Amino acid sequence: MKCSLFLLFISLTFSSVLARGGLSGSATTRLLLEENHSQNSNSVDKAKGYMSNYDLEQAVKQFGRRCSNISRIYSNVIKILHYANGVLDWMISIGKSVNGFPLWVMEISDKPGVEEPEPAFKFIGNVHGDEPVGREITLLLANWICDNHMKDPLAKLIVENVHLHILPSLNPDGFALKRRGNANNIDLNRDFPDQFFPMNNDENARQPETRAIMNWLREIHFTASATLHGGALVANYPWDGTQDQRRNYYGCPDDETFKFLASSYSHSHHNMSLSKEFHEGIINGAFWYPIYGGMQDWNYIHGGCLELTLEISDDKWPNANELPTIWEYNKISMLNLVASVVKNGVHGRIFSSDSGRPIPGSITIKGINYTVKAGRAFADYYRLLAPGKKYEVIASVPGYRSKSTIIWLEEATTLDFILDPEETLEGNLLRSICDCSGGVTTKLVWGYYMEICFVLVIIAFLCFLLKRRTIFTLGKPRQSSKRSVMI
């Protein structure tokens, strides 16, 4: 009896060793006796009913064949840029695992593989090898969109207005080994560069799966994303760490927006918002317990991407017969999260006033220390913001005068900016001759022009007096000639 009580005490003490990993000072008391029992059980039984890596690969390829009109499949391919008929086609190299398994990605869009002025969203599953629910749920999501995009308004909205990228398994080697880390036994959610501590700064020393994600974000400008984990039921948002390594609430500059996104997911979920453990089913990562080298914070800082960490199953490795229920509980939340990139915030494009062409720049919100970059090809931007507030939106491009405007945001708002070039004095003088459209700038330029004209008139008058004096000296015949010119 004493032995049993002792084991129970130890399990409760270490209940913070969760899907996010590591020991923590979490105030939550997650009972993991079932999980610990699962970890000690036969690995074959644990994986029964789940897709193997080979099964996953075949399922992804089958989806690509079945839904080729709205999707494409890519993994370890060479990047190709091809411009034809005004459309830029491209492919991306995302990479392989340590053991060489391709990191397959499904892209869903009405124009898959074509760069458009539309936002991009990504789902990543199976970051931790022993949390496989995301592998299954993301395949179910892709197939549901394929089956319903012609009849369901939300699916249709996503296909026509978003480029959705789904990576079902970031850690296929860890899944095969039935453990948290990859083939090198490295926790991939601790392998990214960290903002507080100098760790993982040598890119060559990072895991291939980590480098694949980082290169992926260099190629595609994702507006938002989410990773799917297991071991709890909560929507987690940045920051994940604190500067002093203590457990306390530490919000990022977009704290209000992240709380809005996390709450939207939680309240769309079957029971996440009813959690007795996490208020409203959401939590700040650092308040839960700090981690360092996490993917979530890196996405926000270096990728310009607002990412949530979604814990979608209390059990890390639930029985496979529970997967349909978990999918139904998360379906609407996942769809709403993807759709949020077009249904919320402010978006638009940046143009030059002199040429009318799109000019890549950046968007900032007064009072929020975070910059969103516009796309390179179309200068399109997508700035997620919590609704019900007033915002001052500022557009900036090097070599152009910044512009700002104030909006009251209730739903998605389209806001295009037309910026004027910053010009030199010579450029202003030249434009004043051919552009008399008025305005303060034109008046200033006209003033400079008049000053120059006045100087030229004085010089001409002095030349006239000098020449007149010369005429009187040379006699009447020359005098008569000059008069005819003067008339």
Image (cartoon, rainbow, N blue to C red):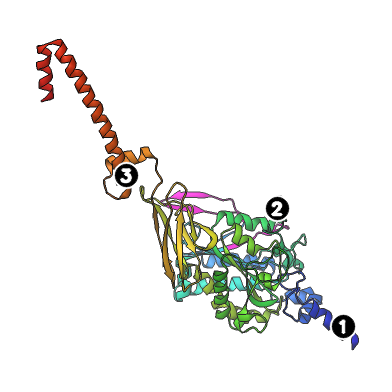
User: Which circle's residue, 2 or 1, is located before the other in the chain?
Assistant: 1
Q: Identify the residue position indicated by label 2 in the image.
A: 201
Three-letter amino acid code of the residue under disc 1: Phe
Judged by depth in the image, the label closer to the viewer, 3 or 1, is: 3
The percent position of residue 302, horizontal first and vertical second, equals 60, 57
Q: Which residues are magenta?
A: 76-105
- Whether residue 9 sits left or right of residue 341 in the image: it is right
Three-letter amino acid code of the residue under disc 2: Asn
**Quadrant of the drawing holding the C terminus:** top left
Q: Is residue 462 magenta?
A: no
Residue 357 vertical placement versus 475 (above, below): below
Q: Quadrant of residue 189?
A: bottom right
Q: Decide which of 66, 416 is in the foreground and name it.
A: 416
Residue 59 marker: none
Q: Which residue lies most toward the right here?
A: 2
Q: Identify the residue position indicated by label 3 in the image.
A: 444
Three-letter amino acid code of the residue under disc 3: Leu
Residue 403 vertical placement versus 234 (above, below): above
The percent position of residue 331, horizontal first and vertical second, equals 56, 77
Q: Which residue lies most toward the top here?
A: 474
Q: Is residue 96 visible?
A: no
Q: Quadrant of residue 404?
A: bottom left
Are there few (<14), some (14-19), or many (20+) residues within 10 Å of tag 2? some
Q: Decide which of 69, 196 is in the foreground and name it.
A: 196
Q: Identify the residue position indicated by label 1 in the image.
A: 6
- Whether residue 203 sits left or right of residue 81 in the image: it is right
Q: CA distance from mark 3 to mark 1?
A: 84 Å
Q: Decide which of 65, 74 is in the foreground and name it.
A: 74
User: Does dot 2 land on a helix, a strand or a loop?
Assistant: loop
Residue 4 vertical placement versus 439 (above, below): below
Residue at image coords 34%, 41%: 428
